[in-house]
Image: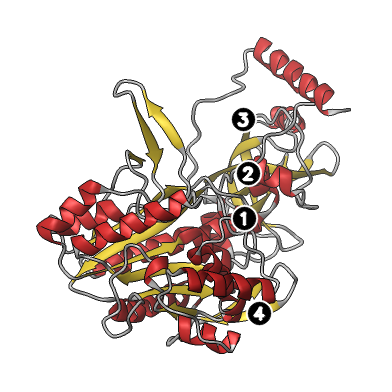
Amino acid sequence: MDQAEYYKYNLDKLSDREAKGEKVYPHVFNPTNSIRIFNKLYHNEMNSGETKESVIEGIAGRVISIRTAGKKLFFINIQSESAIVQVLGNVMFYGIKENFSEDFKKIQRGDIIGIIGHPHRSLHNELSILPKFVEILTPCLKSFPSVRNSLTDVEIRFRQRYLDFICNTDSMHVFRIRSLIIQKLRTIMDHNDFIEVETPMLNSIHGGASAKPFETHHNDLNIPLFMRIAPELYLKRLIVGGFERVYEIGKQFRNESIDLTHNPEFTTCEFYWAYKDYLFLMEFTEFIISRIVLEIFNSYEVPYETTSGEKLTISYKPPFRKIDMITELEECLKEKIPTPYESEETREFLDNQCIKHDITCLPPRTNVRLLDKLVGHFLESQCVQPTFIKNHPIIMSPLAKNHRTKPGLTERFELFIANHEVCNAYTELNDPRIQRERFQEQIKQKNQGDTEAQPFDEDFCQALEIGLPPTAGWGMGIDRLAMFLANKNNIKEVILFPTMRPINPS
């Protein structure tokens, strides 16, 4: 029967059971253990054919397969949180024997059931539970893909995550890794005397990064508001206010294209550490990343397969490689980049280099965008193993402090893994006079057509006038790191409910 017929068939069955006075959706069931713990407890406890008749356990899970051997023997596999155990329904052990056949016949694949019974190891040496009582806790009204064949259609997997987790235990494992990343990141922050804070997600000014925001409107105040693109400017206000170490793990929202490494809604960790600089943060970044990897995998080596199918081994053992952006780019171009980097002469040079090397850069072809494309083509392509690209030009870094020895550059670095940016950090610009100039330059870029340029934040400048101590700031994309550690090359794989294109009803 098709899905509609199957659904109606199950609704009719529910009505029949309700007419007999059955509770088709019981309020509660109290397992003594999860399936995972049940399996762990009895994994090595019994010999083939042995039953622990002195022990009563209660477990619950979703039915993923059913086999019968006549009316007196049922073999049902149930699953919960990717752990599976066999329910060996044997009339000889059932509490009310005259109910045995009826109780088991109404169970079908997809139902969530509760079982009370004895731990048992079958004659085929399979760990099981012998039921004295079984109850359907939640009936499954619709059919779903066979668990044994797994669900491979990515459209269904990403739109209906519940089916993905039922059918693909690897998907649940991915999110266990993601959860561990966040847990261990928090532990590191806490052990270094940081405090976790929350800053606004609705901003009147969308600052802190170069990105196009989502815009909304507040009716009562009658003002436009923006979903935050970064918490940076608020976190630095806290440092001005006297906090010395703050961090925030939370969502950012950017109105940008969706691809294998970008989702409009994503998760970052940002922290700010007073009296430190970017040199310190490079070492601290190596410590953070390597510690997380070592504690999750008990190794610095993690396999990763690229979108092209190339199988790599990424080593997260410090120290990481470091590339000086301009020096390395000039070596690749075999030409000196004119200065100052914001000049029209430099723009023409960068434009010609993009044309020469067949590098696409959509309008507006500003100095920043052209330089970014060249860096992506020549430098980021080298960064398979964890690599820092450091010392960005001022025009690319409106919130970073001028380099102490290299004119025109800033004390900034980005960490790349498998050719993709994972971290961004710098010694923070704390001179309000220069910050105002930088914001003015951003306005100029916006007027040239760069919709991702940052707006002028007067309140932030006033905060700097109160005094921001020497500070180092850092941000990491948790989704990106989860991709590489879970060996996934699509960001949708590590976001529980990724943004999807609406289904065309026609």
- State the image coordinates of residue 455 (x, y, percent, origin top left): 36, 48
Q: Amino acid at mark 4?
A: Leu
**Residue tagged 1:** 493
Q: Residue furthest front?
A: 345
- State the image coordinates of residue 160 (x, y, percent, origin top left): 66, 40
**Residue tagged 3:** 138
Residue shown at the point (41%, 60%) measured from the top left: 182
The crowd level at tag 4 (other Cα within 10 Å; few <14, some 14-19, many 20+) is some
93 lies above or below 344: above
Foreground mark, 3 or 4, reads 4
216 lies above or below 409: above
Whole-angstrom CA distance, mark 3 to mark 1, is 28 Å
Which element is circle 3 on? strand
- State the image coordinates of residue 279 (x, y, percent, origin top left): 31, 81
Whole-angstrom CA distance, mark 4 to mark 2, is 28 Å
Image quarter hosting the N terminus: top right
Foreground mark, 4 or 2, reads 4
**Residue tagged 2:** 161
**Which comes before the other along the chain, label 4 or label 2?**
2
Q: Nearer the viewer, residue 124 or 84?
A: 84
